[in-house]
Amino acid sequence: MKLVIHDVVFSYTSTPVLDNIIFELTPQETLAIVGPNGAGKSTLLKCIDGLLKFQKGSISLDGKDIKSMSRSEIAKHIGYVPQTSEHIFPFTVFDMVLLGRRSHLNWRNSKGDILNALKMLQLLNIEDLAMKNFNEVSGGQQQKVIIARALAQEAEVLLLDEPTSNLDILHQLEVMELIKSLVIDIGIAAIISVHDLNLASTYSDKVIMLKQGKIVAAGDPFSVFTPENIGSVYGVEVAVRNERGRPYIVPLRPLRAPTHSSGARAHNLLSTG
């Protein structure tokens, strides 16, 4: 399944959010989208999933424009994992994964749908959680459940919006290792919006760096994660080292000095503390 994004433009009313976004993705590739808050990362994922309607450009799956596809048809090919998964109703973990089969269902769950959900639970090593309430399992386990739900769709492209947010370092690594192994072993493609540049560097084949909705740099991690690019986009001086064949970013200092008012406020707090 080849995903092609060509000159995509998206605006909220008169406010531009994405400007001429272009890239391609093929099976067994992981693309990281990085950039500061408000750069357009989440918006881009929602445009690819068809949740938001972009104004210009095209997004196609194997040559078919997603604008001509129904929500059910898109869901058969693209699995979307949002930042948060809060649910009012007490779904079990198994029910949450089975929801991924909705695009394939008629009126009721078939034996095949149930077996598919069980297979995804086993694939992610969370079958022991099947009958537990989704809201009662840990954050790392919830992320695995939502990924299992996306895989139950038989999706060929996974979109993951900050999949490591609010996770400790162990669960961050577990989730990223899991995504990378699924991409390679199953032969799917993944697009990950992520703030941690070192996680993006370690687990991605391609990187797109956004600033104010525009692509500042695109390519492999070494070509994107340069001190110049990071300084321009994030306003931070960094050192970039080669760690096990991947760029490793070490923050050094802000390039922009704190404003006088901020400095004065900090001084007052320290003086009165």
Image (spheres, rainbow, N blue to C red):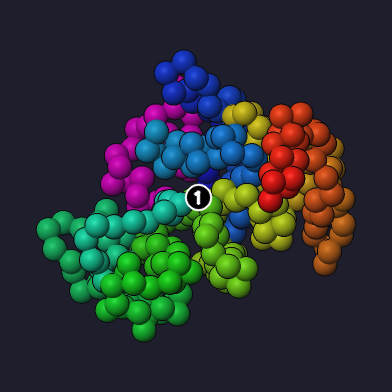
Name the quadrant containing residue 183: bottom right
Q: Secondary structure at mark 1?
A: strand
Mark 1, residue position: 161
User: Where does the image place residue 73, in percent across and percent down from the top left?
Assistant: 32, 46
Of residues 67 and 64, the one nearer the viewer is 67
Of residues 237 and 78, the one nearer the viewer is 237
Magenta span of residues: 53-78
Name the quadrant containing residue 164: bottom right
Query: In the image, is residue 70 above or below residue 1?
Result: above
Magenta stretch holds residue 63: yes
Neighbourhood count class around disc 1 (C-alpha, 10 Å): few under 14, some 14–19, many 20 upward: many
Of residues 271 and 144, the one nearer the viewer is 271
User: Where does the image place residue 121, in percent across and percent down from the top left?
Assistant: 38, 75
Residue 149 appears in the picture as rendered: yes
Query: In the image, is residue 166 above or below residue 169?
Result: above
Q: Amino acid at mark 1?
A: Asp
In the image, taking residue 204 as reference, residue 111 lies left or right, namely: left
